[in-house]
Image (cartoon, grey):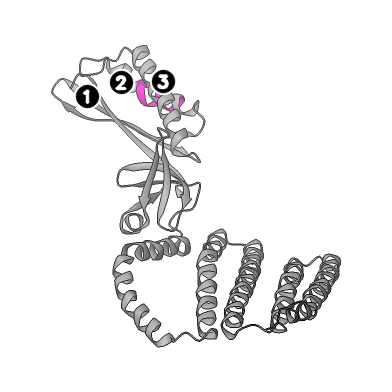
Amino acid sequence: MAPTALPTALLPALGWLLGGGLAALLLGRLCRRLAGRRHSPSAQLLAEAIAPVGWLISAALAWRTLPLALGADQLFMALAKLVTLVVLVRLANRLCTRALGSWMERCPDEAVASLIGSLAPLLRALIWCLGGVLYLQNVGVEMAAIWALLSAGGIGAGLALKQPVQEFFNYLTILLDRPFQTGQWIQVNGITARVERVGVRSTRLRNLSGEAIVMGNSLLTGAVVTNCDEFDQRRVVQRFGVLATADPDALEQLPQRAQQLLDAVPGARLERCHLLELQGNALTVELVYGLEGLDPAQHRAVQQRVTLGLTRLLQELGLTLASG
């Protein structure tokens, strides 16, 4: 191309670039204003994508007016398609995320809403993969070799991701079957803890001493889990021995005095108090009471109050605990 031809060829290119870009900018502002009047988040996102896509189309049309070599033209068009793909994929991801968020807000079930929210990363990854495949096909890449490579790599990936995939399906089981929910107290493998968060791979618990416990979802679905929050009443059994030389009248008063003790403790209710048996020089006493409407942390406080009251009661009655 002659040196004097380049400035002449640039004029139409600049015209396409500036004219098309200005038109895209004005159209984008108009669409954003209309979307704002309708109060539609999805329409607002579409309006925001008009200006970038318009600039890309203007740049592509401007480039085609330049008398350049075929290789440079193909390279530019490939880059333009890539940028357009990125813009469109990001727009699709934002629209899908917005739709999932709206669906979550309308869903009355917290477990299902949490499941819907967990699908957002998977959906974004799927959209990016589909966009990448479409781009490669559009630029003329032979997909047969890529599919063969992906199928071979998929076997290795499946073996490597066996445990994470299993944990994810256990996560779905917890969300749908709902053996427990966030904020509830559970007992599993000898641990009493409150559920803080149910994650895709693991569940975070916090025990009574304040320690954080991270447990895999597969352990939770494969173990016996006791949901403490679903107890209408928690039963406490206390057995202790008193010396057989104790005053029989004091022993006879023990059930009635235990009833008075438990009546004075909110959330506690006496079920029974009996002398069970005589073993050597000790009489075995069984005290059974229920705890109502309390979580495990409050259970400990009530049990402590009952135990202290029982200790004072034994002293008042002149009953001595048997050793051993």
Q: How many neighbours does mark 2 have within 10 angstroms: few (below 14), some (14-19), or many (20 or more)?
A: many
Give residue 199's position: percent from left, percent from top.
45, 55
Name the residue carrying label 3.
Answer: 309
Q: Quadrant of residue 1?
A: bottom right
Look at label 1 and name its amino acid: Leu
Depth order, front residue of 91/109: 91
Q: Tell me the element at label 1.
A: strand
The residue to which callout 1 is attached is 283
- Give the label on residue 205, or none: none
- Which residues are drawn in magenta? 253-260
Which is in the foreground here, disc 3 or disc 2? 3
Whole-percent x, y for residue 307 in the image: 38, 24
2 vs 1, front mark: 1
Image coordinates of residue 87 in percent, x first then y, are 64, 70
* Left or right: 37 as drawn, with respect to 9: right
* Cβ atoms under marks 2 and 1 closer than 8 Å: yes
Q: CA distance from mark 1 to mark 3?
A: 20 Å
Left or right: 21, with 106 as reference point: right
Percent x, y of residue 264: 50, 25
The local crowd at label 3, few if under 14, some if 14 to 19, many if 20 or more residues have their Cα within 10 Å, is some
User: Between disc 2 and disc 1, whose residue precedes?
Assistant: 2
Residue 28 higher or lower than 210, as above or below: below
Q: Which residue is mark 2?
A: 251
Q: How would you classify the magenta stretch by its main secondary structure?
A: helix
